Image (cartoon, helix red, strand yellow):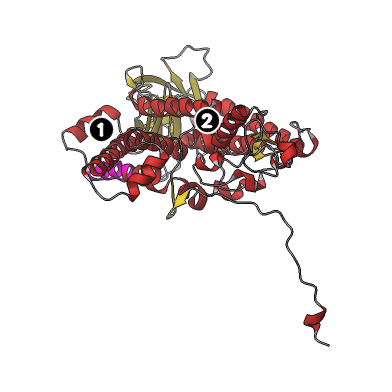
Amino acid sequence: MNNKQNQIDVKDVTPAVRSHRPTDDGHIYVRAQKGQWQRLRKYLGWVLMLLFVAAPWMTWNGRQALLFDVEQQRFQIFAATIWPQDLTLLALLLMVSAVALFFVTTFLGRVWCGYVCPQTVWTFIFIWFEEKLEGTANKRRALDKAPWSFNKIWRKTAKHVAWLAVSLLTGFTFIAFFVPAKELALELVTFSTSFWVGFWVLFFAFCTYGNAGWMRTIMCTHICPYSRFQSAMFDKDTFTVSYDVERGEARGPRPRKADPKELGLGDCIDCNLCVQVCPAGIDIRDGLQYECINCGACVDACDQTMDRMGYEQGLISYTTEHKLQYGVTHVARPKLIGYGIVITVMTAVFIYMASSIMPMGIEIIRDRNQLYRETSEGLIENTYTMKIMNKTLDTEVYRLDVEGLKDVTWIGPKEVKVRGGEILSLPISLATDPYLLSSPVSDVTFVLTHTGLAEGDRKAILRNKSKFFSSFN
């Protein structure tokens, strides 16, 4: 008997759900939306943009407050100057930032992506220019389909000019964090900048223009790795933008005054606004998707529709899977507490290390050509090279001394002046009577005193140990 005759045909009885995608040839025309979450995102975006532009122009004691000078190998952050020797601080800060991102993602989902990510902020600034110059989403769609005319040419040209202006400003501002802003501005205006500085300004301008103007959420969906591994941090108590299926289904249009229960419908009227305002072009009613950046545009659109229909808000909202299923969310959970503990410990270590940075440094290098020599007076002499580093940006005076030897003779200057950021190599010698030595190798400690700081300041004195060799028998 044929097995196919014994098979039972399977019929899919799952209710058909239409998924709306507002794309024409892959292009998403994002509809403008007002609401509490969009106001928050807009104001936060403009504030972050203004801070970014203004930051390189801020000064501290007459210098640029934020300057990451790669050529001079120093990072200036207000009063603090970080040198290559202190770059463990930067690594620790990046680790704290990474764990903080994990903490926020576990708690609130991809709010970083939706509200403060530079890609999102710049994309919405570009969309803002697009709306002002080309009109609403429907007008932009019609304009793209229309034949070329004077109206289309000037609107498209004005839009791209605005995009390029923002891109060039972004490229200049970004490089101004690494090259003094005033010098960079003067060099660009006079076309006297070096090839590489000009190249990097144009490169980052090009990246901004391409990412925020053309690629947009393609960056978030296909290039940014965060969208891929975020699921490892999500759990059923993570707050994400979610659609209440139990309340919304079955969806469908109806008169405003009609009772949806009598019509066998849920609260979703299938207006499609939640899709039209989504920058990623997804339908949140299909469930949580990795393209969603938690921007809340669909939440505002749905709440607006619910108000017009006289229904309760929250059909689409920032909620959790447990909240939708059982009405309860467990905020204090082991994973979130663990992230919080790690952040607290790492932040405490960072603060301790940052507060312990010395404003100067000292390194002692012994003469490798000979361990010691005997002088004509019968003294034992050892030669050293002291490397004294001034980690501040001002000229400082330092006093030099040595501990560990009795009646030692110091051959060389005992007070030096070192310019800001300079490393001074100073050859010095120590000599002492061999009868005062108790072993062929003695411990000595070189002491560097910062005369510009109070004697009681723990950062005023720096010690570095070395060895003193002799011919002791």
Bounds of the magenta segment: 195-205
Spot occupied by residue 288 in the image (x, y as percentages of width and height): 64, 46
Examine the image and state in which quarter residue 202 appears.
top left
User: Which residue appears at 80% of the width and 86% of the height?
Assistant: 2
> Regarding mark 2 in the picture, which secondary structure is present there?
strand
Question: Is 186 or 151 nearer to us in this picture?
Answer: 151
Spot occupied by residue 193 in the image (x, y as percentages of width and height): 21, 38
Mark positioned earlier in the residue sequence (1 or 2): 1
Along the horizontal axis of the image, is 10 left or right of 339?
A: right
Question: How far is the residue under mark 1 from the one under mark 2?
Answer: 48 Å
- What is the residue that sits farthest to the bottom in this orientation? 1
**Quadrant of image for the N terminus:** bottom right
Question: Is 357 or 119 nearer to us in this picture?
Answer: 119
Q: Is residue 473 visible?
A: no
Question: Is 261 or 284 nearer to us in this picture?
Answer: 261
Question: Is 153 or 188 nearer to us in this picture?
Answer: 153
Q: Can you identify the residue that label 1 sits on?
A: 184
* 32 is higher (above) or lower (below) than 8: above
Q: Is residue 305 visible?
A: yes
* 48 is higher (above) or lower (below) than 88: above
User: Which residue appears at 24% of the width and 41% of the height?
Assistant: 151
Spot occupied by residue 226 in the image (x, y as percentages of width and height): 55, 46
Q: Amino acid at mark 1?
A: Leu
Spot occupied by residue 64 in the image (x, y as percentages of width and height): 34, 24
